[in-house]
Amino acid sequence: MTAGGRAAQATNARARLLRAASWGLLAGPLVVVVAYPLGQLLVASALVDRRISGTVYTRVLAEPDYWRAFGHSLAVSTAATVVAGLIGGALAWVVARTDIPGWVALRRWLVIPYMIPPFVAAFAWHGLLGPAGYLNQAYLTLSHAGPVFTIYGAAGIVFVLAMTTYPLFLILVARALDQMNAELEEAAEISGASPGRVMRDITLRLVAPAFASAAMLAFSGDLSNFGVPALLGDPVGFRVMTTAIYATVQDVTVPNHLSVAAALSVWLALAALAVALFQLWTHAQGRHVIIGGRGGRTRPVRLGRWSAPVTAGAWMLGLVTTGGPLASLAMLALTRAYGLPPAWGNLTWQHFLELPSDPLVRTAVTNSAILTVAAATTTAAIGFVISYLRVRSHSRFAAVLDYVSGIPYVIPGTVIAIAMILAWIQPLPVLRVSIYNTLWILWLAYCARYLAVPIRGLNSALRQYDGALEEAAAGAGATPLRIVRDVAAPLVWGSLLSSWLLVAVPALNELTVSILLYGPGHETVGVAAFLMIRDGRIATAAAFGLLMILVVVLGDAVARRVSRGRAALW
Amino acid sequence: MRRKPDRYALIALTCLIAVAATSDIPVSQADTVSGTITYYTVKPTELVNKVVTDFQAKYPGVRVEVYRAGSGDVIARFSAEQQAGAIKADVITLADRPFVQTLARQSLLEPVRSRWLSSIDPRYVYDGGRDFETELVAIAIGYNTRLIQKPPTRLKDLLDPAYRNKIIIPDPGYSGAAFAMLATLVNTRAFGWDFYRGLKQVGTLVGQGNPAAAQAIASGERPLAAITYGDVLSLKQRGSPVDIVFPKDGLVVVPQPTGVLRTSHNLAAAEAFADFCLSPEGLADSAAFGYATVNPQIRPQGLPSFAGIPVLSADWKTASAQHAKFLSQFRAIFGLH
């Protein structure tokens, strides 16, 4: 047999294996976690008495409360994105372009708020800026007028969302500025352009794509957020879509409440899909310019006499946005009994020491540990196979799998949770038990939510190698399994590990999906913290919240170490 | 006003008689029950945790999983499961007497077999012995001792403009106790819906549950509340600057019955748990939390007397039939949706 013939035979064998594997291994899980639940969502919202009907939608769309909630969602997300963009963009320019002293440390310090789960941040800011927060108390002792600032309602939600998302802009825009060729700016300056003109015509234009993708990420994150509006909006009756859906699920007095929730979910999903499509469209417009190829060290802008105020301002901002919530949580956690003034005699470690014996904490930590490991491992495994087929086989089927697995990533977690409830509340056909109210449904929902993460990472990692190594192994007679084990997997091992962590860390603190799917005894860490806050167990919640932040910071450090800096939470 | 006979004396007497008539009822032994049970409850988390921990220490083979929320949320979850034909709860405690009554009438509740039944005031055993109370829950005025020097002594005092923007009440749509207060006051000529309109006029905030409202008093966010007294007293014991007054113009009693579901897959463990809740040990946890209990021997420390305060009554038939209407009228007054 000729060498060419052997190679052809090997390729044939591989193709056959790929086809068989793709049908068996991939379509199944994707149907279970994505296609079937989302299908059930459409069915539940459009089926009345077993007939296709638009009555649920007409009922929902005729309700002014839901339109108000939708308007609130859009308004709050837009405002938070704008505020975060202004703060994050300005800070990015300062840390990446100017000669501000200590910019390396500043950059690290300023991104910490991104690692605080947003609802924990809302709770922490409430401790400072709530009607009886530390700042308002301090103000009240000075003057006996009412509180200066109340964090409840739209303004507070926008504030907290902006404070937790501005690092996104800082990270992405600063990275773009780092990679940008500063010679372009220099050339403009030499040609006599004013600094303002350089900024407007060169710098801003070149960072626009990075800015736009940060804005899209921030906007869709704000749109899907549940915890912040639940804690700061509900007390004053300010509803957004995610909290309206949650309330509908809870309210059995609404006729067909799950169908109504399904229709609202479809509505919210369409809004989120529109945002994602808009982003694809702007990309297709060729607005993203290749800005790589750095011409040496970018020349820092000398701040000169502005150095002192800018430095002070940037550090102060970092101190407020990072130090503020952390200090608030620490004060709440260390104060012996809620409501006592901050004084030495009132401090205690008791609330931290009580955490390990708290039944809710124990249950939640165990469940979250199980779910996190299960979800991260499953998504990494399925993701690897899909990504491998996608990159190596060029089959259309694999491309479809890739797209399908990306859908849950762009639609809000609330929608995924409703879809899971509708799909799995009925008992399973053969086993005759329902997975609703168990950890299994949470596991499925987490898998759906995070499946796109490893696929994205692995697609780009696998594209860096061509298939020659695998073909050589096949030519040498290696079995397909052996090829994957000994050749393909080791090549992308680092990416696999870092995408595992990129799923694990957010999964540990997940709230939006879990709050709708948890059952008694199946609380997760995010749910437990949320319930403590709602139940008014303030000190315990604060201590637990600090631990959650610590875990994220550690997880991020490990992810960086493992991937040698290529993967981090941001 | 003529003082009513001391309620505790009465209870003690009844109990003596009851104890004397005790027959030996077989109760599952600690080493024979095992497995997992699920407890749906509206009791404050810290109290539930304590009771569950103590129970599990006594019955090491049993694991109790707890779902705690306000009556509104617990009923929502329970009803959804009932509709799906898969009731997960084995034991349930709700501050919604009519709902529990319906469960009893549908024969969904197992008759309570506990050797401790005889030690408690028989007035707190309902529906032919299918459900019972453990704590005596009532509405008090809770206040922040640092911010309110002279607390109001009557519910009506809360309408004083001096308390503008200082009051919080739990949401009757979430809290069964708050709904009991609504049903009771609306049924009482001296209060009626005007009382709630008055509360709205002084800028009263509608919070979520009682524990959260108690925290709002402690922090000073809202230094005054009409609230279940145990939630406030438990904070006071830990050192928060809070206290309670039982309003002189009327005591709102909140029925909060507990029952064992007949659908339970682990009836032995569920009954053992109900038995423990009624036992002196279980009730001691309630008393330690700040609640008066159905066993007159087991009393909390530092509970102000509510003897002599007229007990207001609700028309539960109307209230439960018009549950949704009451809530929507309440929401309309407070501009909620």
Image (cartoon, coloured by chain):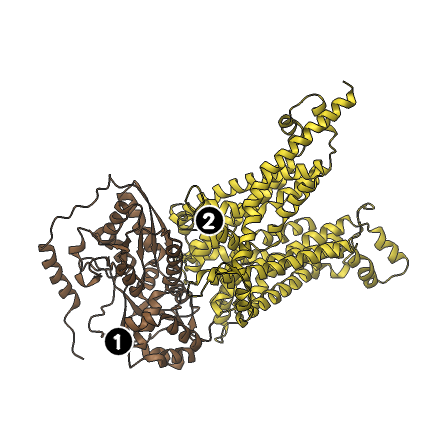
Chain colours: A yellow, B brown
**Secondary element at image label 2:** loop
Residue B132 position in % (x across, y down): 23, 59
Residue B10 left/right relative to B263: left
Mark 1 residue type: Lys
Query: In the shown orientation, is residue A163 left or right of residue B55?
Result: right
Res. A519 mark:
none
Question: Quadrant location of residue B195?
Answer: bottom left
Query: Which residue corresponds to mark 2?
Result: A524
User: Which residue is labeled 1 in the image?
Assistant: B248
Q: x and y percent of residue B240 in the render?
A: 37, 62
Closer to the camera, A299 or A199?
A199
Do tag 2 and tag 1 residues touch (Cβ < 8 Å)?
A: no
Percent from the top left, x then y, of residue A488? 67, 31
Quarter that holds the N terminus of chain A? top right
Task: Check the image and report above or below for A245 versus A27.
Answer: below
Badge nearest the viewer, 2 or 1: 2
Element class at badge 1: loop
- The chain holding disc 2 is A
Question: Residue A126, can we see it?
Answer: no
For the view shown, which residue lies furthest in the top direction?
A1
Task: Point out residue A496 in the picture as x, y percentages from the top left corner.
Answer: 62, 37
Mark 2 and mark 1, same subunit? Answer: no
Identity of the residue drawn at 48% across and 63% down: A248
Along the viewing direction, whichever of A136 and A307 lies nearer the viewer: A136
